[in-house]
Amino acid sequence: MKFRDFEDIVSNARIGRYLTSMAGNSKKTMTLYRLNLRLSQEFFTVVSCLEIALRNKIDRHYSAIHGVDWLRDSAQGTGFFNQPICGITPRIVNTAMSRLNPYSHQKLLAEMDFGFWRYMFGRHQYFAGGQTLLAIFPNRPPSTPHQQYNHSYVFAELEKINMLRNRLAHHEPICFANGQAVKNTTYARQHYAQILELFRWMNINEQALLYGLDHIETVADQIDAL
């Protein structure tokens, strides 16, 4: 495809950053744009696997403590999330419940997004749930006086992944230095390492899980070499 046609489809506003980073080389610009799309696709797969693993770990933990319908029950009556300090958490659950006919626990779990599971480590939700949820990360490092690997740390780490997920969903580039038209894979590589670390904390063999699915480093290397 000619660059003029490519630019017309993608838009001048979107392609301009790529063109600047490639010093006006139209061929390299189109290649970088396509590589960014590939990198985003690779990340979406890996983040989806992390979300499923996190959701299932939380579900098994709370099912053992609060019962098999813990999520439904948590937002109703005397449920542990049904209190003012938990904000909109019970409303999110009840709204999702209203969309289910018939109800099943697994369907309700599937209605919750990554942000919901992240908030299980928010201060109020974590304490309301019994302050035990860090047990799903048996391999997390021991805390030190200088670094606490507590629920707040996990919440912050998951927030970074959630922000990455939102960037992917809104087709924002992940191949540039922050806020600059400079080709750089540092952001992508840092988040990739962070995701792998969270798998390891959950005692999940990330290499076996992602076998054949994960080509993030390969694509990032191609971007660096462009």
Image (cartoon, helix red, strand yellow):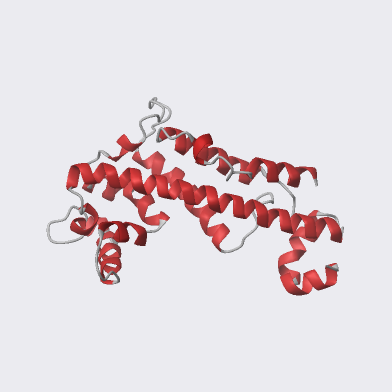
At a point 12% along the width and 61% down the height, the residue shown is: 77
Q: Nearer the viewer, residue 85 or 46?
A: 46
Residue 168 location (% of width, % of height): 57, 58
**Is 168 or 103 nearer to us in this picture?**
103
73 above or below 123? Answer: below
Looking at the image, the residue that sits furthest to the front is 212
In this picture, is 26 found above or below 125? Answer: below
Please tell me in which quadrant of the rendered image residue 172 appears: bottom right
Residue drawn at x 45%, y 33% as measured from the top left? 200
Q: Is residue 24 visible?
A: no
Q: Residue at x 49, y 40 (%)?
A: 209
Q: Residue at x 22, y 59 (%)?
A: 72
Q: Quadrant of residue 37?
A: bottom right
The x, y position of residue 75, in whole percent, is 21, 60
Residue 5 in the figure: left or right of residue 112: right
Residue 60 seen in this snapshot: yes
Q: From the viewer's perspective, tell me whether residue 116 is left or right of residue 193.
A: left
Please identify the residue farthest to the left as the structure is shown. Answer: 78
Residue 173, position in %: x, y? Answer: 65, 57
Q: Nearer the viewer, residue 102 or 73?
A: 102
